Image: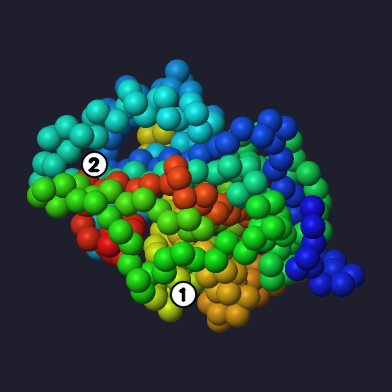
Amino acid sequence: MLKKNMPPNWKPPAPAWQSNWRQQEPLLVAYFAQQGASPEAIDGWAKKFLGSEAGALSIEQALYTDIEGVVNYIYISYWRQQDYLEWWLRAQQWWQQPARLEPGVGFWREVFAMPQDHFETLHSSPNTHGIGATTEDIEGPIDEHGYAGGMRDRIEILQGQDAKATVTPKQGLVASYSADRRRVHVSLPENTCMIRSGQNWSACNTEQKQDYLLNVHPVLQKGMRYLRDNAQESGCYCMRLATKTDYEWQVVEQTFGLGYACDIYAFEDWAKSHPSHIAIFASFMQMAGRYGEDLQLQLWHEVAISPGQGSEAEYVNCHSNTGFLAHC
């Protein structure tokens, strides 16, 4: 791993681990969601098509109440890319049915190709999350984190190119519409950056749990709102701070930010210099300083650069502030 952005004699402020994969087959994450008062329709689809026989590497669920006050019930699935493509040929017909256009509900899917040289993971402990939980190969503690450019140092493709944005929120995205404009398909531009950044306080004792929820989580919420509400300034197309659930949609003590930006530099610039992220980092480091090696909070993220082909989004009967729709 090259370390072209690492400062001389760098010592990370806290330990971190990364996930590795022995087999270099392309991976993929696919989000499927229903907007509305109930997940009944998408639950029926998931029961039929997202069972253990589907071939996904892992499946999670989450809730998110969006800027319009609408609840989004989200299925998160990680795949080998070829398995997903074969499976989607069988599963997509449901999404095309006229019933998806009934009043009061919307459906969306966001699919992001993740060739292994296009993404990185980072975990604050050897307990892995997200796509990192689909492999048992964990490396660490590593030095390549905690400094500006650390994400780029961990993504192989960025050792030989800069992956600057080809399109920005100011320019808008190209979309295709059905005749009634209620179905919208967006092909994500090359170098679009996805981040899923998680917080898990389920293993914290009462003291650390209260500390996190009172002193860190509100600061995180403020930062996520800034990215959600300031696309043109930040370069971030959308940001959702979602709450993980069990398989019955009961919330658990985990959240994650799911965001997309025009390129990795948009997220990096925000992390490096924006007051909202500086405050997040400071609040976490203060908590880490209070507990040292006894810190029980688990943080993690995965960051991916779109290769262009294989990354797409589709919105069916959704309101105009859903995901990438606000930029079409």
Left or right of 313: which side holds 307?
A: right
**Residue at image point 53% right, 70% down:** 266
**Residue at image point 73% right, 44% down:** 126
Q: Residue 47, located in which quarter of the rendered image?
A: top left
Quickly name the residue at label 2.
38
Of the residues under marks 1 and 2, which one precedes in the sequence? Answer: 2
Looking at the image, the residue that sits furthest to the top is 53
- Residue 285 in percent (x, y) is at 70, 70
- Residue 199 in percent (x, y) is at 57, 55
Left or right of 69: which side holds 214?
A: right
Residue 72: image tag: none
| Amino acid type of the residue tagged 1 in the rendering | Ser
Nearer to us of marks 1 and 2 is: 1
Quadrant showing the C terminus: bottom left
- Residue 320 in percent (x, y) is at 22, 60
Quickly name the residue at label 1.
234
User: Which one is nearer the viewer's eye here, 114 or 277?
Assistant: 114
Q: Tag 2, which secondary structure?
A: loop
User: Which one is nearer the viewer's eye here, 224 or 305?
Assistant: 305
Task: Classify 10 Å Cα crowding around label 2: few (below 14), some (14-19), many (20 and above).
Answer: few
Question: Would you say residue 225 is visible in this rendering?
Answer: no
User: Which one is nearer the viewer's eye here, 124 or 109?
Assistant: 109
Q: Are dots 1 and 2 in contact, CB under 8 Å?
A: no
Q: Is residue 235 above or below residue 39?
A: below
| Amino acid type of the residue tagged 2 in the rendering | Ser
- Residue 127 in percent (x, y) is at 69, 42
Left or right of 190: which side holds 151?
A: right
Question: Would you say residue 286 is visible in this rendering?
Answer: yes
Left or right of 48: which side holds 190?
A: right
